[in-house]
Amino acid sequence: MSGDAEVRAAVPGLSGPHALAALRAAGEATRLRILALLAGAELNVKDLTQILAQSQPRISRHLKLMAEAGLITRFREGSWVFFRVADTGAEGALARAIVASSIRPDLTLARDQARAEAVQKARAEAAQSYFKAHAAEWDRIRTLHVADAQVEAAMDEALGQGPFDLLVDLGTGTGRILELFGPRAAKALGFDLNHDMLAYARMKLERAGLTQGQVRHGDLYNVPLPDGAADAVVLHQVLHFLDDPAAAVAEAARVLAPGGKLLVVDFAPHELEFLREESAHRRLGFSRDQLGRMLQGTGLKLERFRELSPGPSEGKLTVSLWLGVKPVAAGKNRGLSPKVEVIA
């Protein structure tokens, strides 16, 4: 049996020409080193030039060949372009098989990994600096509502255990939602426009070893995913920052597959005006019916609503959870269901 025939037998769905192209793309010492690095982390060209001590044009050429062969994927984040081993398709399966077969005592790969860890440590320190600079503001907001653990427990109950093929977190921030719910998904994607927050979230996911969790630079009004791609979408404490929260809900519903769940977590209506000036809040919370109408307008059915109140204390915020489900078959009546589960 020829080499490409053996590969096609090991990786179903890979045609002869594609198998040959993929093997040629991987069949060079530096490209094998790059594949091994990209199997463990998302890296950009600058990272790889530092790790491999090779010129940017040379690294870029290697990446271009492997991307064209489908072995790696690329995605833009501002002025940077990041790369990782492809996680879908026959070519991605082949790339992972190549990396797995190369994991053995190897001094060159071990040195590469040590340099990669140094690069990631530097990125993590920069991300931590940003987080510390804003931690006081976030901590102050947390003191205004029930404990995060209580909110996360309610989210866990509402979202359910899955499993999900794709979970999407819009406005991912620190990546906390991916940490919490990523393990119950085959793939978990977080989108955000803030590059510093993305760097922090990426660092946390790498440290947690959550390889199926990834973050991307993306606008939640225009998510770079096809219609019906996700089984679950989360909007956690995002809508009150937006000028057009209904448009964000509509975009979340667009990427949701029939039967999929949209979980929205935000504040109930309040009168803490200082949050507008000090924390850039555009909206002072949402009522049950206000968010319910947004869900209704996208064709989603409100299945559950819950309020988490801090009690009678003045100046405190109530956190609300809305769970919308996309009907498997669209019905004529898109009004709010009279059987909505309301939990005080």
Image (cartoon, grey):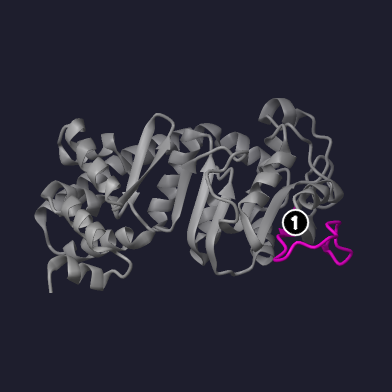
The prevailing secondary structure element of the residues shown in magenta is loop
Query: Looking at the image, which residue sits at the far top?
Result: 277
List x then y, in percent, for residue 289. Answer: 86, 50
The picture quadrant where one finds residue 103 is bottom left
List x then y, in percent, for residue 335. Answer: 86, 56
Q: Quadrant of the N terminus?
A: bottom left
List x then y, in percent, for residue 14. Answer: 29, 64
Label 1 crowd (10 A; few <14 / some 14-19 / many >=20)? many
Residue 336 shown in magenta: yes
Between 212 and 6, the one nearer to me in the picture = 6
Q: Quadrant of the C terminus?
A: bottom right
Q: How many marks?
A: 1
The residue that mark 1 highlights is: 300
Between 291 and 178, the one nearer to me in the picture = 291
The picture quadrant where one finds residue 220 is top right
Residue that appears at 54% across and 51% down: 176
List x then y, in percent, for residue 173. Answer: 55, 42
Residue that appears at 76% across and 54% down: 299
**Residue 111 visible in the current orientation:** yes
Determine whether, in the image, residue 231 is placed left or right of residue 314: left
Query: Looking at the image, which residue sits at the far right?
Result: 338
Which span of residues is magenta-colored? Answer: 321-344
Determine whether, in the image, residue 92 is placed left or right of residue 107: right
Instruction: Give the structural element (helix, strand or loop) at label 1.
Output: loop
**Residue 174 visible in the current orientation:** no
The picture quadrant where one finds residue 271 is top right
Determine whether, in the image, residue 168 is placed left or right of residue 34: right
In the image, residue 9 sits, relative to residue 155, either above or below, namely below
Between 313 and 12, the one nearer to me in the picture = 12
Residue that appears at 47% across and 34% down: 195
Amino acid type at image mark 1 = Leu
